[in-house]
Image: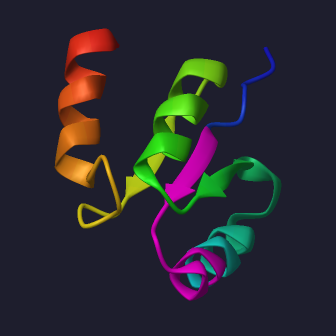
Amino acid sequence: MIKERPSVFIADDHQIVIDAIRSELEDFGDSLHFLGSATTGEEVIKALNDKKIDLLILDISMPEPDGLEILQYIKKTV
């Protein structure tokens, strides 16, 4: 049986934070699949609608909508 790698998406309004988290995730090698990143809440919502994300690393203080509003969106739609 072949296991699917969990897909990871990073959402933060600071690119340096995204780069640091991604660098740490690369230590897991092929066990994770990095889907991408977003720097605004709108980009996160679009990614949630377009991609199958298993793990979302989410900054709660992002530009509109903020991380807490994104969490509410996830609870309503997923």
Q: Quadrant of the N terminus?
A: top right
Measuring from the top left, give residue 5's x and y in whole percent. Answer: 71, 36
- The answer to which quarter of the image holds residue 58 is bottom left
Measuring from the top left, give residue 45's x and y in whole percent. Answer: 47, 33
**Picture colour scheme:** rainbow
Query: Residue farthest to the front?
Result: 64
Which residues make up the magenta segment? 7-19
In the image, is 46 to the left or to the right of 57?
right
In the image, is 63 to the left or to the right of 73?
right
Vertical placement of residue 12 versus 49, above or below: below
- Pick the residue in front: 27 or 17: 17
Measuring from the top left, give residue 20's x and y in whole percent. Answer: 59, 85
- The answer to which quarter of the image holds residue 18 is bottom right
Vertical placement of residue 29 versus 52, above or below: below
Residue at the image position 25 percent from the left and 67 percent from the top: 61
Q: How many marks?
A: 0
Residue at the image position 34 percent from the left and 13 percent from the top: 78
Vertical placement of residue 38 versus 75, above or below: below
- Pick the residue in front: 54 or 48: 48
- Pick the residue in front: 22 or 5: 22
Residue at the image position 21 percent from the left and 21 percent from the top: 75
Measuring from the top left, give residue 74's x and y in whole percent. Answer: 30, 25
- The answer to which quarter of the image holds residue 6 is top right
Residue at the image position 81 percent from the left and 20 percent from the top: 2
In the image, is 60 to the left or to the right of 33?
left
Q: Is 25 inside the magenta-drawn segment? A: no
